[in-house]
Image: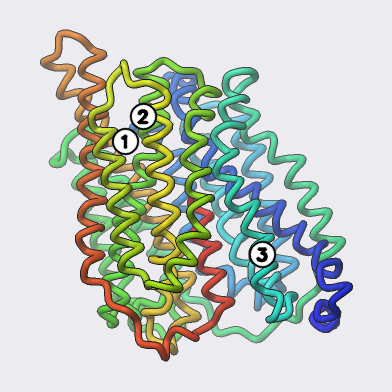
Amino acid sequence: MNNQHDTAEKPFSVKTIIGPMMAVIVGMIMVILDSTVVNVALPGITEYFKSDLTKMQWTITGYTLALSAVIPLAGWMSDRFGAKRIFILTILFFTIGSVLCSVAQSPEQLILFRVIQGIGGGMVAPIGMAIIFRLAPPEKIGSIMGMLGIPMLLAPALGPVISGWFVEYSTWHWIFLINLPIGIIAMIIGFKFLPNFETKSVPSLDGLGIIIAPIAFSMLAYGVSQSATSWTSKGTLTGLIVGGVALLLFIVVELRQKQPLLELRVFKSSDFVRSILITWIMQIALFGSFLIVPLFLQTVKQYGAFETGLIMLPQALASALMMPIGGKMYDKVGARPMALVGLTIITSALFIFSKISVDSSNTFIMLTLAMMGAGMGLSMMPINTHVLQSAPRHLVSRVTPLTAAAQQVMVSFAVAGMAGFLTSSTKDYMATAKNPLNAMISAFGDTFLLAAGIALAGALLAIILRKPKLKDSDASQAELDESKSSMMVGH
């Protein structure tokens, strides 16, 4: 590992790592952008295919579920086949998926191709981050993480704007086709600059877990999305029952495995359970509303996709601005005050949105979005770090894949659930309203109120957070930062 010694020499520290970092950054930006571009494009794509929201939200849900399915495999695949090879292959897979998305002829095709995209995208960040950690000397890891962090925070801000511009001034196909040149550049840089790491002997893969987990989570998400029709409809009950049984089976299988796909034994820690529950609640409230705001702007306010993207910008910028502040404050006061403050701000913003109307000004909407972003920036990293530090020490290395995969599952539930709730509320109001526009506004108001209620539950739960024991806090800075990167991928 010559690179490790080279990076320790001050004149060459950045130079020796700049090539590999460029490969990782380009690959990660591409994946993070694709986690946000579809939100703004969704109304246009739904119209293009003459489909409905309950079906088209699966372009987001399918992608996030595919991400969650492959994230836990990243470490195993890297050790077994080599990090460089798998990193380049995942980018190739993601790029092929992107090109297929751009030529999709039906909603079903687009959903399938988004799943292919997600299977490629899920491993890019964990493997990319692991590569950089192995190359960077310990004393430089902080500054290098900062360099990696900038594009990772900018991508969620740029995603809706770029997406909006393509949808409005060209065609939605370009939001996927743009990944072809980016993917090729990432692969070329990767081939040229990424070092070949030695492969390791690895334990046998948890094959049963790999099969059951996607069935459990996709069926549960399907059941939740079908609730738009009725909670007692055939589709809803089938999804929830099949998903529930598969989930129970998955838990039994994982607890009996020596090398499980996801380390569920960590849930024995009550501190871990409290912090992960708060994380999940916050993700459901936030990521559900990230879908609903662009829908409101385009369907009620009748804004174009580009203008919608620009209006969404303050949210990502406020989040990026407050994230380092949240990190510094966490070091001083711990997770509980940061979680309380952040979730209270998010709850307030969502409650304000529940009063939204067709007359609400852009300034009002942008300030409320900035408020939501600020709450997210202040609390997400402290809570995420707390999750890692509250895990039993011997299980810390297994927590990162668990939290990263669980985040994508929660995002998929949030999108499916909020889209389903919005659709059913709209139907209910339409049945009695004289004015269809008023019916839609009322349905959006109820959906924001639901999200606010979920966020409030998280804020109340934050009161019982405890400081993890000091012996866990020195677990592993690399894994801590890797976990942070995994969290950002979902933005």
Q: Earlier in the sequence, mark 3 or mark 1?
A: 3
The amino acid marked with disc number 2 is: Leu
Q: Position of residue 193 (x, y in %)?
A: 84, 64
Q: Quadrant of residue 120?
A: bottom right
Which quarter of the picture shows residue 424? top left
Q: Residues within 10 Å of mark 3 (few under 14, many from 20)?
A: many
Cα separation between marks 1 and 2:
7 Å
Residue holding disc 3:
128
Element assignment for label 3 = helix
- Give the crowd class for mark 1: few <14, some 14-19, many >=20 residues within 10 Å: many
Do residues under tags 1 and 2 come within 8 Å of each other at their CB atoms? yes
Write down the residue under mark 1: 419
Nearer to me, 186 or 19: 19
Q: Residue furthest left?
A: 432
Up the image or down, 421 lies above or below 126; here it is above
Mark 1: secondary structure: helix
To which residue does mark 2 refer?
Answer: 53
* Nearer the observer, 48 or 437: 437
Q: Earlier in the sequence, mark 1 or mark 2?
A: 2
Please name the residue shown 52% across and 74% down the image: 480
Q: Position of residue 433 (x, y in %)?
A: 14, 13
- Does residue 30 appear in this view? yes
Task: Indicate left or right for 487 with 352 as reference.
Answer: right
As drawn, is 197 to the left or to the right of 154? right
Measured Cα–Cα span from mark 3 to mark 1: 33 Å
Going from N to C along the chain, the mark reached first, 3 or 2, is: 2
In three-dimensional space, the C-alpha distance between marks 3 and 2, rounded to whole angstroms, equals 34 Å
